Image (spheres, rainbow, N blue to C red):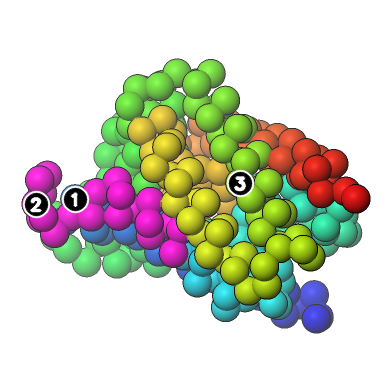
């Protein structure tokens, strides 16, 4: 497949992940106010992120591999599944897709008169954060460890589900459910990144602390991706 088409698929897949996942958090998590049965809450947001990856993988996986995440691209490279020469182009496409999706989401959210972003609040516009900007008030050390470990496990799930000996056709389901579980665990800690592009897209819109803490949501997920890729490369070797 031509690189241009693969990059377009990564752009669109990451766009869909951010619009669907972060969109559910911004538009629907507390729809109608706290305690309203129409709000989807933590469980709904977690499921939304998983569904974006599941549907995106089925739509674009056969074109680009369905990374939609710089940490996944790094991890697949470390695991021997992805060429180094394509790493930077993939990451650029993913980040651009995330930023465009965040901009579109902002335009949609601004369509109601009561919408505003408070950059001093935890999780504003689905941003990731630690310390005072963690939804549960978790420390930077706890947030960093969470992002490293969960991204590493995510890579192991991805590489295992897409292994030649794995059941054919089911990988997107396993990967989507894996991401759902990751969000169920870590939304209270960091608002769940495990994806530097996803973190960057919304941080660019919000600014302030979301941008200042963005380094953590690049370093920790990429480190975790590398660890997961290396572990599975060893595990899956005959």
Q: Name the residue under label 2.
A: 36
In the image, what residue occupies the spot 83% across and 57% down? 81
Q: Where residue 182 sits: x, y (%)?
A: 48, 43
The x and y percentages for residue 52 are 47, 65
Say which element carries label 3. helix
- Which tag is nearer the camera, tag 3 or tag 2? 3
| Distance Cα–Cα, label 1 vs label 2 | 7 Å
Q: Image point 51% across, 59% down: which residue? A: 176
Look at mark 3 in the image and give the residue it sits on. Answer: 154
Q: Which stretch is magenta? A: 32-51
Q: Is mark 1 on a helix, strand or loop?
A: loop
Mark 1 or mark 2: name the one nearer the start of the chain: 1
Name above or below for residue 55 compared with residue 121: below
| Mark 3 vs 1, N-terminal side | 1
Is residue 147 shown above or below 20? Answer: above
Label tally: 3
SS under mark 2: loop
């Amino acid at each position: 497949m031509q690189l241009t088409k693969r990059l377009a698929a990564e752009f669109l897949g990451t766009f869909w992940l951010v619009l669907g996942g972060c969109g559910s958090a911004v538009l629907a998590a507390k729809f109608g106010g706290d305690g309203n049965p129409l709000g989807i809450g933590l469980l709904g947001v977690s499921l939304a992120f998983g569904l974006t990856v599941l549907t995106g993988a089925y739509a674009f996986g056969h074109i680009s591999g369905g990374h939609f995440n710089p940490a996944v691209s790094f991890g697949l490279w470390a695991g021997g599944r992805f060429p180094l020469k394509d790493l930077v182009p993939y990451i650029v496409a993913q980040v651009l897709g995330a930023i465009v999706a965040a901009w579109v989401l902002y335009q949609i959210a601004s369509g109601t008169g009561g919408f505003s972003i408070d950059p001093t609040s935890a999780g504003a516009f689905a941003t990731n954060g630690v310390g005072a900007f963690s939804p549960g008030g978790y420390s930077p050390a706890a947030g960093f460890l969470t992002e490293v470990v969960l991204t590493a496990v995510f890579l192991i799930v991805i590489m295992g589900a897409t292994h030649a000996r794995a059941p054919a056709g089911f990988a997107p389901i396993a990967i989507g459910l894996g991401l759902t579980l990751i969000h169920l665990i870590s939304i209270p800690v960091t608002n769940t990144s495990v994806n530097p592009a996803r973190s960057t897209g919304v941080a660019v819109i919000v600014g302030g602390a979301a941008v200042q803490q963005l380094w953590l949501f690049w370093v920790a997920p990429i480190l975790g991706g590398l660890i997961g890729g290396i572990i599975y490369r060893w595990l899956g070797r005959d």
